[in-house]
């Protein structure tokens, strides 16, 4: 059992995240005595789908302090009206934990998002901070950090699970939830996006490669973002006296999943793939930290038309942190060049180099930090 960094809210909340990230396991751990309704169970799904008001009987029979957990709430959006009623009639004393893969289906079906009566929290695969060094970097980059993968030693079982995950959850489930009409088109799109993971995204080129319309690509990208299977990293425009690139980048939520989609899961890592995956890992780590600790940061990358680039900008108010991310055990001064210039011009307030080495060091204005120390470094400065 890995200790997760998310803290249990004191009020009712939605908990959104991709399948198999450990939402239900975490809730079992932090709310062991809660009343649980699992809408993945056909019996419970049919019961509540046909008669959502059944929930009121459960509520009335439960002590007021008892939490009620409803797994995969998006499968029966009409249940949210009953949840709303229970929270309202108890003056907020009745507490619900509502899990789901995203809010997308709820909103598309005009479901009740509880009008501010429930918080929203996101859940991620295991972070480096949660793993506490129990897995090698090579393992993490190859197979990712979904909890069932992290706890499995057999490489063949890990590979089989990830291939099943992609087939079942990232394709068929999305189609079953009526998010896409043509599974073959969506499958081609996923493969193209996996190949382009961490690279600057040109929607027209993606549409051409996936053989779908540009508008379809925009819709598919929205699905991946809404279901937390990945996120767009927009270009930063700091009013610098250069011409910046405006297209966004896209990163999948897990390194093992993106390798599976791209068909590379059973191959050895080459240096180029390792670099992209390490960058994905570090950015996802910071995204999870931002969500769990409620830092309120926004994320960007920066690149100019003449090729100057910074991998990540993390901005929260007057705090503007720049990051250069390198999958190398030794740090070279050329890696710091763009960050040092941005610090000198007061474009960023602090600059960091993240690498796979073991020692922290200083390179002019850039603080170079081993990836394992990233989270604590950021929290100490926040």
Image (cartoon, grey):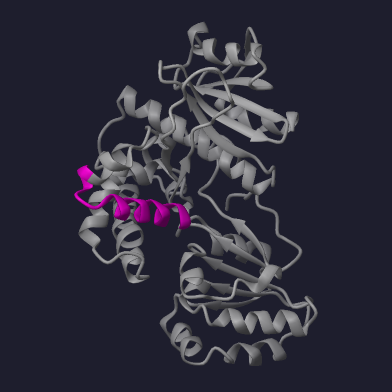
Pick the front one: 91 or 264: 91
Q: Nearer the viewer, residue 316 or 135?
A: 316
The main secondary structure of the magenta stretch is: helix
**Residue 334, placed above or below residue 3:** above
Left or right: 208 as drawn, with respect to 294: left
Residue 184 screen position, x and y as percent: 20, 58
Residue 323 picture location, percent across and down: 56, 24
Q: Quadrant of residue 170?
A: bottom left
Q: Position of residue 108 (x, y in %)?
A: 46, 70
Q: Residue at the location (72% across, 79% down)?
A: 87
Q: Check the image and report above or below for 271 versus 331.
A: below
Quarter of the rendering occupied by the C terminus: top right
Which contiguous range is marked in magenta? 208-226
At a point 35% along the width and 66% down the height, the residue shown is 173
Q: In the displayed structure, does residue 253 sit left or right of residue 361?
A: left
Horizontally, residue 71 falls left or right of residue 201, namely: right
Does residue 263 appear in this view? yes
Is 212 a magenta residue?
yes
Residue 128 can be seen in this image = no
Q: Is residue 84 above or below residue 232?
A: below
How many marks the image carries: the answer is 0
Q: Is residue 316 magenta?
A: no
> Where is residue 15 drawn, in percent x and y?
59, 62
């Amino acid at each position: 059992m890995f200790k997760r960094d998310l803290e249990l809210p004191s009020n009712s909340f939605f908990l959104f995240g991709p399948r198999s990230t450990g939402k239900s396991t975490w809730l079992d751990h932090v709310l062991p005595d809660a009343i649980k309704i699992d809408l993945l169970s056909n019996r419970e799904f049919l019961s509540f789908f046909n008669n959502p008001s059944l929930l009121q009987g459960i509520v009335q029979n439960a002590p007021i302090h008892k939490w009620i957990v409803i797994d995969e709430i998006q499968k029966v959006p009409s249940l949210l009206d009953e949840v709303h009623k229970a929270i309202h009639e108890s003056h907020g004393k009745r507490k619900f934990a509502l899990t789901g893969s995203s809010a997308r289906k709820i909103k598309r079906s005009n479901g009740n998002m509880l009008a501010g009566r429930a918080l929203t929290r996101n859940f991620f695969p295991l972070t480096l901070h949660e793993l506490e060094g129990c897995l090698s970097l090579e393992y993490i980059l190859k197979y990712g950090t979904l909890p069932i993968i992290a706890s499995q030693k057999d490489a063949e079982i890990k590979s089989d699970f990830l291939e099943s995950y992609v087939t079942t959850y990232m394709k068929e489930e999305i189609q079953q939830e009526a998010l896409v009409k043509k599974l073959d088109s969506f499958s081609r799109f996923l493969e193209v996006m996996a190949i382009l993971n961490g690279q600057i995204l040109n929607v027209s080129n993606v549409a051409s490669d996936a053989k779908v319309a540009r508008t379809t690509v925009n819709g598919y990208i929205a699905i991946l973002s809404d279901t937390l299977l990945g996120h767009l990293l927009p270009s930063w425009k700091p009013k610098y006296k250069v011409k910046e690139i405006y297209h966004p980048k896209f990163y999948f939520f897990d390194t093992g999943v993106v390798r599976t989609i791209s068909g590379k899961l059973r191959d050895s890592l080459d240096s180029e793939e390792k670099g992209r995956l390490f960058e994905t890992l570090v950015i996802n780590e910071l995204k999870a930290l931002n969500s769990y600790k409620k830092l309120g940061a926004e994320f960007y990358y920066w690149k100019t038309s003449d090729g100057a680039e910074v991998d990540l900008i993390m901005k929260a108010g007057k705090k503007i942190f720049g990051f250069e991310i390198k999958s190398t055990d030794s740090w070279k001064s050329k890696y710091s060049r763009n960050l040092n210039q941005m610090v000198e011009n007061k474009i960023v307030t602090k600059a960091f180099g993240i690498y796979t080495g073991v020692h922290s060091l200083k390179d002019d204005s850039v603080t170079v930090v081993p990836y394992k120390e990233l989270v604590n470094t950021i929290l100490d400065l926040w």
